[in-house]
Image: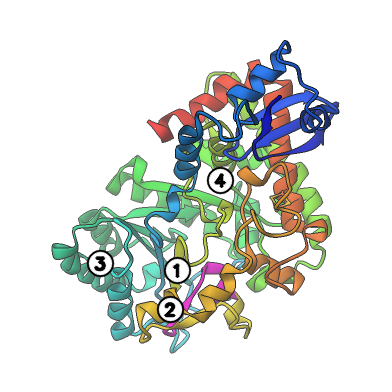
């Protein structure tokens, strides 16, 4: 006789995948879940001991090791301990590029009334310091925030002054296209140890056609080189956005990153906001993106097998969820969702939004995820009716489809995406393209662990090792 602990399962290739509450997984013969539930697993079977050791079953109604299970669950959800840690400041909507996939509805560089007002900025920094989090990340976004270095400086100087008494750990990140990294901007970055998060879309032709400029590639590459030279190699990272034309070039994009001295890439799908909404076939895009991801990951595995360390960052995040007990601090793969719990956005116009995507919706005239105004109180913004309303559907543990999904421990909830693509924050998993994408990617990684374990495990272990030391 044994007792059941919470676990979920699904048919997986020729076997069955079982995943427990803290993300431990087992591949078993098909029909195993039914045998477990019908109490047919005998103590003589090796499986019995695997299930016992991995918190799938217990010899007593309350497992003797319940405290260990509780501690592991608490660790997985530790991102909730400190509440909102990532504070995004949209300093301007103006930009000096013209990206075809722009999700932020950026405006011409010369546009008026699109910069954040200084009093709003200073008030937003004060709001940030009301967060109970011991670690605060200030991320400067746009538009192109390097166009307003005086606002970056004002925000940081205010934060440093408040931190004289608050004693928090502050991290500064400048999200920039690297085209306008002037002496003034780089001096500021050096003075305050600001990290540069930039973007490179791949080889020259692809990058330039994505940016709507004929000389963007040269400028971005030169900006990245200058930033590295001034600030140090480790202070510059890059993201790529998979535009529709990019789907044909998985290997070329990886090679462009390698040629430009990057040791990693973060594969990011297009999101349906801003100009990217003009992509008119999201179903086809999602199918092609999944194939693109698999091809790119396969190529990256081959690169690593040849002895060159090169990391795909999204895969690494999911591997951390599968193979380690730690939370990953990535707002898109959280439950409860990243909105409000981990991230908040202070917009150039004084609005406070639940996430970056929320303010992008607002640019299209939809203010559903606007928490209020920078002049409102911290309590009304972070604990008010809007935030409480979002909480009804921001946990995978409670929403239909996710609540019994075997991949739940590795995935995350996204009420904003559900709302923007399906018209309801709650969403509908069977028809959700986001669900389809996450499911395909997580299952692909699990399939690699199942079928090519000896080949990929040394590589994947190396990818996650440094992050959890
Ligand atoms: S979004 Fe899809 S893959 Fe993720 S937990 Fe929910 S049902 Fe599972």
On screen, residue 167 versus residue 109, left or right, reads: left
Q: Quadrant of residue 147?
A: bottom left
The vertical placement of 338 against 221, above or below, is below
Which label number is shown at residue 344? 1
Q: Are the residues flagged by discs 2 and 1 in contact, CB closer than 8 Å?
A: yes
Residue depth check, mark 3 versus mark 1: number of the one nearer the observer: 1
Q: Give the mark nearest the N terminus, 3 or 2.
A: 3
Residue interval drawn in magenta: 348-360
| Residue 88 drawn at (x, y percent) | 42, 67
Q: Are the residues flagged by discs 2 and 4 in contact, CB closer than 8 Å?
A: no
* Helix, strand or loop for disc 2: helix
Q: Give the mark nearest the N terminus, 3 or 4.
A: 3
Residue depth check, mark 2 versus mark 1: number of the one nearer the observer: 2
The vertical placement of 409 against 379, above or below, is above
On screen, residue 165 versus residue 187, left or right, reads: left
| Residue 312 drawn at (x, y percent) | 57, 38
Which label number is shown at residue 156? 3
* Helix, strand or loop for disc 3: helix
Residue drawn where x is 30% and y is 73% of the image: 125
């Amino acid at each position: 006789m044994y007792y059941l602990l919470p676990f979920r399962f699904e048919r997986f290739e020729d076997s069955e995948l079982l995943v427990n509450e803290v993300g431990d997984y087992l591949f078993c013969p098909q029909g195993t879940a039914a045998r477990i539930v019908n109490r047919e697993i005998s103590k003589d079977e090796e499986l019995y001991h695997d299930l016992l050791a991995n918190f799938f079953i217990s010899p007593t109604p309350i497992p003797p090791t319940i405290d260990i299970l509780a501690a592991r669950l608490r660790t997985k959800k530790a991102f909730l301990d400190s509440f909102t840690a990532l504070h995004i400041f949209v300093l301007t909507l103006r930009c000096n590029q013209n990206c075809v996939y722009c999700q932020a509805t950026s405006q011409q560089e010369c546009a008026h009334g699109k910069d954040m007002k200084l009093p709003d900025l200073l008030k937003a920094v004060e709001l940030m310091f009301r967060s109970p989090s011991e670690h605060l990340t200030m991320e400067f976004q746009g538009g192109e925030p390097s166009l307003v270095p005086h606002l970056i400086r004002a925000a940081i100087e205010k934060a440093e002054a408040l931190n004289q008494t608050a004693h928090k750990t502050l991290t500064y990140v400048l999200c920039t296209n690297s085209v306008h990294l002037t002496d003034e901007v780089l001096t500021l970055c050096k003075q305050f140890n600001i990290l540069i998060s930039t973007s490179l879309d791949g080889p020259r032709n692809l990058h330039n056609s994505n940016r709507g400029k004929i000389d963007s590639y040269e400028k971005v590459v030169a900006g990245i080189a200058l930033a590295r030279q001034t600030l140090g190699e480790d202070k510059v990272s890059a993201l790529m956005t998979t535009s529709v034309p990019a789907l044909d070039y998985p290997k070329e994009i990886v090679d462009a990153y390698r040629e430009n001295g990057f040791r990693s890439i973060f594969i990011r799908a297009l999101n349906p906001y801003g100009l990217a909404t003009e992509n008119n076939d999201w179903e086809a895009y999602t199918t092609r993106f999944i194939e693109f991801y698999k091809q790119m990951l396969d190529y990256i595995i081959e690169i690593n097998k040849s002895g060159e360390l090169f990391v795909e960052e999204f895969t690494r995040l999911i591997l951390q969820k599968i193979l380690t007990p730690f939370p990953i601090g990535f707002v898109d793969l959280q439950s409860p969702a990243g909105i409000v719990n981990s991230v908040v956005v202070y917009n150039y116009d004084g609005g406070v939004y639940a996430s970056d995507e929320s303010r992008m919706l607002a640019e299209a005239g939809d203010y559903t995820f606007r928490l209020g105004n920078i002049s409102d109180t911290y309590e009304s913004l972070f604990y008010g009716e809007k935030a409480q309303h979002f909480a009804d559907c921001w946990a995978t543990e409670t929403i239909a489809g996710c609540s019994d999904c075997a991949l739940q421990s590795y995935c995350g909830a996204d009420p904003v995406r559900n709302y923007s693509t399906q018209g309801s924050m709650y969403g509908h998993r069977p028809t959700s393209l986001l669900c389809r994408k996450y499911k395909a990617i997580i299952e692909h990684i699990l399939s690699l662990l199942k079928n090519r374990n000896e080949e990929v495990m040394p590589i994947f272990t190396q990818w996650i090792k440094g992050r959890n030391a």
